[in-house]
Image (cartoon, coloured by chain):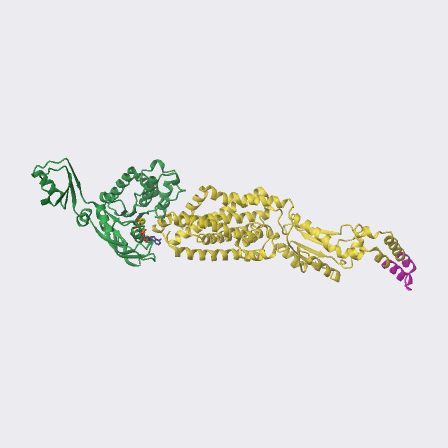
Amino acid sequence: MITVNDLRFSYGNGPAVDGVSFTVSAGEIFGLLGPNGAGKSTTIHLIGGVLSPAGGEVRLDGGDPKRPATRRRLGVAPQTLSLYEGLTGEENCAFFGRLNGLSSKLLKERTARAIDLAGLTDRARDRVSAYSGGMKRRLNLAVALIHDPPILLLDEPTVGVDPQSRNHLFDSIEALRGEGRAILFTTHYMEEAQRLCDRVAVMDHGKIMDSGSVDGLIARHGGPSVVEVEGLDRSFAVEPLEGTRNGDLCRFETPNPMIVLQALADRKAAYTGLRIHRADLETVFLNLTGRRLRD
Amino acid sequence: MNILLTAAIKDLKLLTRDRVGFFFVIGFPLLMALFFGSIFSGGGGAAGSMDIALVDEDRTGGSAEFAKILDATDILQVITLDPASAMEKLKKGDITAVLVLKKGFGDGSGLFFGSEPLIEVTVDPSRKAEREYLRGILIQNAFEGLQKKFKDPGQMRSMAQQGLKEIQQSPGMDPAQKKIYGDFMTSLDTFYGGMDPKTSGKGSFFKEPAIRFVDFRKDQAGPRSYFEISFPQAVMWGLVACAAAFALSLVQERLRGTYLRLLMAPIGRAHILGGKALGCFLACILTMTLILCVGVFLFKVRIGDPGLLLLVMLCAAFCFSGVMMFISVLGRTEQAVGGASWALLLVFSMVGGGMIPLIIMPKWLITVGHFSPVKWGILAFEGAIWRGFSPADMLLPCGMLLLFGLVFFSIGLTIFTRRGIA
Ligand SMILES: Nc1ncnc2c1ncn2[C@@H]1O[C@H](COP(=O)(O)OP(=O)(O)OP(=O)(O)O)[C@@H](O)[C@H]1O
Ligand SMILES: [Mg+2]
């Protein structure tokens, strides 16, 4: 379990992490969402004990990540591919396995498993420099798993990969949750978060804007859904449903699209097309963090 | 320790897989050794300056003046010493040769009768260049002064006539004796009278002066071939390349994220840097061993004292592991560190005698060279290979290597840890 309480950190030019608190329980995927420069990676580095917090504290199953023994419980897939290009996939796994104190016997078994999980069995003995971007990403995750850690920090583990690799990674991560690990996951891809995460937090300027279940966030920050109806019967009065008519197209903004659909059905209204835009995490994200470009 | 070794082995593996890096560590230094070794073995290049010791057994005005003449030449730096300390210095390689002026040198009589050579030069026969150089310089400069005295037949003739007169007028002399000396002086007079001042001035009378060269071989000291000078240099190049390669790998770890992963592994920072230093240390040892093996087995480089050589190798590996740490903080990017490392190490090598042998370097550059670990490394290796250093002689160069290692490592470590990640 990861516990982060009022975490603060600055690189010297204003706060990068500014009072962040959350917990990630075993068997849970917690998504940390935020635009570029929000402070996601910094938070991960603080949790990994690489940086020392200026305030607040981090606990991993109750232990301080500054202590090496605590970090034995931690597996990290950093945002930058952290692999030795001159070593093979297998050697990368084995090297970090040894650093994590695995015995030679266990090492063999775990390496094979991690490589298999990454779908790299055929290429395990090739140098990483010969891997494609997707293969490197998968290996980057595999290396994090080599010592079977109960806590995982995955910093944008799917960046720059094709849909096949992405799906493979999703399956892997879901399987890891199934094994009861606590997983912290950062991403800019909202549909990813929506599919994988049990809970999410939207972060910006080092602060958590809001957090909770995906549905809860959408309900709080998504705004109304929009029902668009094309070629609707002229006799149908839109005003009672707070709709607007613009030529051939009618728009209804409503917290519950079912009310509009029900009304259409009740009056047997004729129309040629219908679209429902439900608020999603992306809307929540943009509502919470604004549309201004980030650096 | 296990972790350190794991990290070190990983780095060694990476180094051997990087063909270019590996070439610079082993191939390039060997090429340098062969190149310089074979150029200078030919007996080509002459010294820019040469230190010699002068032992004056004659102790006359003539011998003192001779020393002055030698010292006044551009090339020779002469110190006057007693025989024991002169040989000691020669053994250590502080000087190139020992020059002994025998009794009777000052009056020049030996030159006349050519009995025993009046100058004895002790020098390593393998140092052909220096030896021939010395011979040339002695003939050209030193004998010039003496020859002047005898060059003018007129002056010599009047000296002979004067002598004859004195003999004839001397009252107490045995007549038989008088006859012998008188005949001699007369024949001298005749001899000088028949001489043409012009030809005698060209030195036809004084053939090449008698100089005895005494070989100073190892058993005593001195490199047997130029390869014994070029291989210690090559070893330094190898070390320099090792330090540069590992410094670069440390920067790469930082930039490519593996350092971050290492930091989050259940090991301390000391393990990470210690592993890197150990890797560099082992790479240095392996490099030195490889280069020296080539030297010993293919180019007949003799190891004077294997025990001391091992000590030197350990000290040198320690030193360059420290240098590695320092280089790794000279820049933040691979290009910056790569460039800076070669610049720094080039200067180290240049002033330290890694490129040009110390024996032909100008004095001031040799002084600057004291600040280069390469200089002490070369001295220590030569000490163990052919200079015949005793353990006590080794204290200074090995101590300097350790000191440089410690200082560079501390500076590097301080800056490195202050920088954090990426
Ligand atoms: N090493 C560093 N030195 C100085 N400032 C830094 C450093 N690393 C990050 N920052 C700054 O800290 C802030 C947070 O950066 P961080 O990398 O944590 O963002 P992020 O949410 O991971 O962004 P991204 O999605 O682009 O990875 C940014 O303003 C960034 O410029
Ligand atoms: Mg980031």
Determine the residue located farthest toward the front in the rendered image. A247
| Residue B266 shows in this picture | no
Q: Position of residue B352 (x, y in %)?
A: 55, 53
Secondary structure mostly seen in the magenta stretch = helix
Q: Is residue B139 above or below residue A251?
A: below
- Between residues B209 and B294, which one lies in front from this camera angle? B209
Q: Is residue A3 left or right of residue A102?
A: left
Q: Splitting the image into 4 quarters, where does residue B82 fall?
A: bottom right
- Between residues B78 and B150, which one lies in front from this camera angle? B150
Is B179 inside the magenta-drawn segment? yes
Determine the residue located farthest toward the bottom in the rendered image. B171
Q: Position of residue B11 (x, y in %)?
A: 43, 46
- Between residues B81 and B334, which one lies in front from this camera angle? B334
Q: Is residue A91 left or right of residue B27?
A: left
Q: Is residue B376 above or below residue A265?
A: below
- Between residues B315 and B412, which one lies in front from this camera angle? B412
Span shown in magenta: B159-180
| Residue B110 shows in this picture | yes
Q: Is residue B55 above or below residue A164?
A: below
Q: Residue at x 11, y 40 (%)?
A: A261
| Letter of the chain shown yellow in the rendering | B
Q: Position of residue B116 (x, y in %)?
A: 77, 53
Is B8 inside the magenta-drawn segment? no
Q: Splitting the image into 4 quarters, where does residue A236 fall?
A: top left
Q: Colour of chain A?
A: green
Q: Is residue B64 left or right of residue A275?
A: right
Total count of labels: 0
Q: Position of residue B230 (x, y in %)?
A: 58, 47
